[in-house]
Amino acid sequence: MNVIIIRGPCGCGKTFLRKKKYPDILYHDMDDLRQYIEGQGITDSYENYLARMEELHKRILDSLTSKDVPPLTIIEGIFAPGSHSWRWLCGMLRNMAISYTWEIPEYTLASAMQNLLNDYEKDGNIERLHERQMLLTMYHKKFQ
């Protein structure tokens, strides 16, 4: 089994890259999982941060250990260099003897911000826009 990790800050084009380059490959988008988990009552508050991360990690681990897992899987998320989630993911894949590579889409801060605004025009979710703008601002320099 192989995993391709598409990583980068919000708005950098991870989903665009995945849809263009790997349209028919099973994928796990951390933002989709996060939104699902929040819908189950685990919010992004500080008190629930660890519970949210644990649930995200459990879902990824469960999917990779399923007997029906295909030979190639995509995992899409921020996974900033040195972050807890990046260290956890790489460590887990190594422990499971799963080979992995990663890709970071090429982007500029201006193009990423415009992508966030375009998404907001589609979904109208101002809270999501603010959160994604904050995450872009926090993490974009780590990927440059």
Image (cartoon, rainbow, N blue to C red):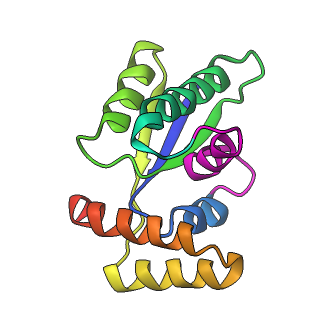
Residue 126 in percent (x, y) is at 57, 75
Residue 32 in percent (x, y) is at 64, 50
Q: Quadrant of residue 134?
A: bottom left
Residue 117 is at least partly visible in this image: yes
In the image, the segment drawn in magenta is: 22-42
How many numbered tags mark residues here? 0
Q: Is residue 49 above or below residue 39?
A: above
Q: Residue at x 62, y 28 (%)?
A: 59
Q: Is residue 40 left or right of residue 6?
A: right
Q: Residue at x 64, y 50 (%)?
A: 35
Q: Is residue 34 left or right of residue 46?
A: right
Q: Nearer the viewer, residue 15 or 25?
A: 15
Q: Quadrant of residue 86?
A: top left
Q: Is residue 102 inside the magenta stretch?
A: no
Q: Quadrant of residue 108?
A: bottom left
Q: Is residue 41 above or below residue 96?
A: below
Q: Quadrant of the C terminus?
A: bottom left
Q: Is residue 23 inside the magenta stretch?
A: yes
Q: Is residue 17 left or right of residue 69?
A: left
Residue 110 in percent (x, y) is at 36, 86
Residue 139 in percent (x, y) is at 29, 60
Q: Quadrant of the N terminus?
A: top right
Q: Nearer the viewer, residue 104 or 30?
A: 30
Q: Residue at x 31, y 49 (%)?
A: 80
Q: Residue at x 56, y 46 (%)?
A: 30
